[in-house]
Amino acid sequence: MMDDALEFIEQNVENAIEDLKEIVRIPSVAAKNEGLDETAELLRGKLDALGFDAKIHEITGAPVVTGFLDVGAKRTLMFYDHYDVQPAEPFDLWETPPFEPDIRDGRIYARGVADNKGDTISRIWALKAFIDTGTDLPVNIKCVFEGEEEIGSIHFPEFVEKNKGFMKADGGIWEFGGEGYDGVQEAWLGLKGIFYVQLEIDILTRDVHSSMGCVLPSAPQRLAEALSSLKDADQRIQIDGFYDGIKPLTEAEWNAIDKIDLREEDIKENYGIKEFLTGLTGRDFKEAYYNAPTCTICGLTSGYQGKGSMTVLPAKASAKIDFRLVEGMDPEDIKKKFRKHLDDQGFSDIKFLWYEGYPAGKTPVDNPFVDVVRRANAKVFDDLKVHPTSPGSGPLYIFQDYVPMVSIGVSDFDSKGHSPNESIKIENFRKGMLRLVHLIDEMGRW
Amino acid sequence: MMDDALEFIEQNVENAIEDLKEIVRIPSVAAKNEGLDETAELLRGKLDALGFDAKIHEITGAPVVTGFLDVGAKRTLMFYDHYDVQPAEPFDLWETPPFEPDIRDGRIYARGVADNKGDTISRIWALKAFIDTGTDLPVNIKCVFEGEEEIGSIHFPEFVEKNKGFMKADGGIWEFGGEGYDGVQEAWLGLKGIFYVQLEIDILTRDVHSSMGCVLPSAPQRLAEALSSLKDADQRIQIDGFYDGIKPLTEAEWNAIDKIDLREEDIKENYGIKEFLTGLTGRDFKEAYYNAPTCTICGLTSGYQGKGSMTVLPAKASAKIDFRLVEGMDPEDIKKKFRKHLDDQGFSDIKFLWYEGYPAGKTPVDNPFVDVVRRANAKVFDDLKVHPTSPGSGPLYIFQDYVPMVSIGVSDFDSKGHSPNESIKIENFRKGMLRLVHLIDEMGRW
């Protein structure tokens, strides 16, 4: 009967791709509040068609879609995905339009195909493989699809708070993952937290002819000076107390990490650089990757940005900044410390226009569910690298009290999540579905 | 006969406004290379219709329009104007569309109406007043209208080099000027020079998920640090040798300056600030205004600038910067010193994408043509403040060997040149035309 489910996947790769194309055509950009209800309804319908108790939960912000299929099994498996995507800007760098899926050289291109609509559809089709072939599901299934992951899952805790009972499961599959630099599959047991803030300084009533720069203050100059104050020459973040309370990597984590080759040379080649920041390499590089908090300027805006010259002293300047947080850091605390830093440096006129954030979260490396994932992976792929955490962020902390999460998925090193020309390999999409069928099977024997 | 010319102006204000509306409807933005040929041809036609020897000179870049009317007089008066305008961005701050002239509360609103199409049309109508009423012109007239003033008059020297004979005149009226904070007319005898440069840093092959900020270098962070290195806390520009060779204001200039009230409080109120940069006031404020070089960030661009958040580490960052230069400074020299500063500070990876510039220029305060302007002004307006130089820039240096230039015009303190909702007072447009008729008359008696 398991063979029927596996055979179903092999026979239906094209149909699953059509489903994926359908969902990536909707530009469900949470940052712009576009296409969210439509995508949520599409997913609810798919779960409903599989016989799930499928619901749309209206919360502040984008709705959460849940599905529950209770087969009376001992174990419950959860799938967490998000149906929102990053903005597709800059559009002109896309070879084909971001919301018109295109297949070339064995890959599907579209915004959200890797992060993480490809995963979502692969999970739905793994379930469909059991249900449509009449193969008994050996575990109960819970699906939770949110619509604000790309803007910090700001309202998801509100959902969890109201649905604590639903959140309980024996193991969960998180919203990303896939093939690394070297073609080896990767699983991620944790995610960094984040504090994202938009700074704005607005010191003149209007833009002025730049000749007045001789006597008037400059918003972009002050912003540059404030941003420059954030790091020293060694890239150490200069916010007072920023590193306080950070939990170092454990011995068990270092044991896992020491087995992993992060392929520094490949990363450098991929991004066209000769050296990492401050010349990081080896264990220092690994420590930064897995356990360093960051402070990154994601956007800068001021004055004239068109072609050629405009001689203007801009009234305003703005920056978007993200801080990646590791275990032991709290976004509210970082917000206060960052505010104090700006005030102490004389930049009280630089305002926080808005902000959002959440802490880091991790599943222990020795949780038995990690072995279930490892065994399922081995049925389809050669190997699996188990990372104690990703350098990326996600609201895994919310699940920490309810279910151990592991992140595996259908992306690969060239997937360009958050960048133009995002894509996945069709081959990984196919194998990813097969791995999930095995995962459900393996979990039934746990 | 002079009375006929003056009466002609009074009777034709509406017709002159229609001419002004016609020319501001053309979005002749030099930075975008739009509408330039069309505007040049329109002006050539107007001069031709007045009986001028009118020509379009094709040079590299936007064409130069000239007109010569030789009446065999002793003195020759020149009008220098530019038919290009600044970009109108940001469009959403305009109350009415920038290229659809609108009249409200006695003002005409449109991009370029103040800088300087209003002046251009007022000068053409002052000439028309003589010609259409059969009043003898007591001076020969030369008109020079260029189309790249707003992008640094980059090709205008090429025209001058080829037309040295045409450039000779006894006095010239420059392309801007008008009513100050206190309602008193102002004349400007000089203009600062400029060095405008676009910086770009491009250190990754593509935009990356910002989680990689833990190990990858940041283009916007490096740009902010480079920009921050440009000034110290006292706003002193830190480029080595930047202030070398600057010619201090002369005693004659200080004598003129001491008579001028720059109305510091009005400027502060207008821009919504409590203090000028470093608390400048009195003679220090005046010295900065008339003789300080500047370094002003006109634009900043990097990464995501849309709504909400995008977690991206941008591959590139860019800044537009203008330096206002005073007498004794050379743009080529400043370019080299700025490049050296960046290199010395470790920012050799920040490139000059393009740049342009020219030096400062001044007409001596005791030139007799200045008195001609003063006498003409007194026939129409109460008073005239004579500034040794403007804090703004223009290619006056090009004229310095050929003709003493004085800048008077139809703008006022609320004209918002280079900003949204640019406008002029219709009353100043009318009086400006009358003043020009008197100027021609006064110059005939010099």
Image (cartoon, coloured by chain):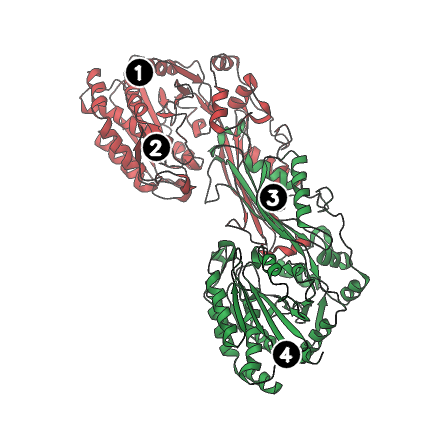
Chain colours: A red, B green
| Quadrant housing residue B264 | bottom right
In this view of the protein, can residue A326 be seen by the observer?
yes
| Amino acid bearing label 2 | Val
User: Label 3 near label 2: C-beta < 8 Å?
Assistant: no
Marked residue nearer the N-terminal end (2 or 3): 2
Query: Subunit of mark 3?
Result: A
What residue does disc 2 label?
A113
- Label 4 belongs to which residue? B72
Where does residue B353 sit, x and y in percent of width and height? 56, 43
Residue nearest the viewer, comparing A258 with A442: A258
Q: Is residue A74 visible?
A: no
Q: CA distance from mark 3 to mark 4?
A: 59 Å
Q: Position of residue A186 (x, y in %)?
A: 40, 19
For mark 1, what is the residue? A380
The amino acid on which the numbered mark 4 sits, given as a three-letter code, is Gly
For marks 1 and 2, the one nearer the N-term is 2
Is label 1 in a helix, a strand or a loop?
helix
**Which quarter of the figure is the C terminus of chain B placed in?**
bottom right
- N-terminal of the pair, mark 3 or mark 1, is 3
Closer to the camera, B315 or B146?
A: B146
Three-letter amino acid code at the position of disc 1: Val
- The quarter of the picture where the N terminus of chain B appears is bottom right
Mark 3 closeness class: few <14, some 14–19, many ≥20 residues within 10 Å? many
Q: Position of residue B379 (x, y in %)?
A: 67, 80
Q: Name the mark on residue A223.
A: 3
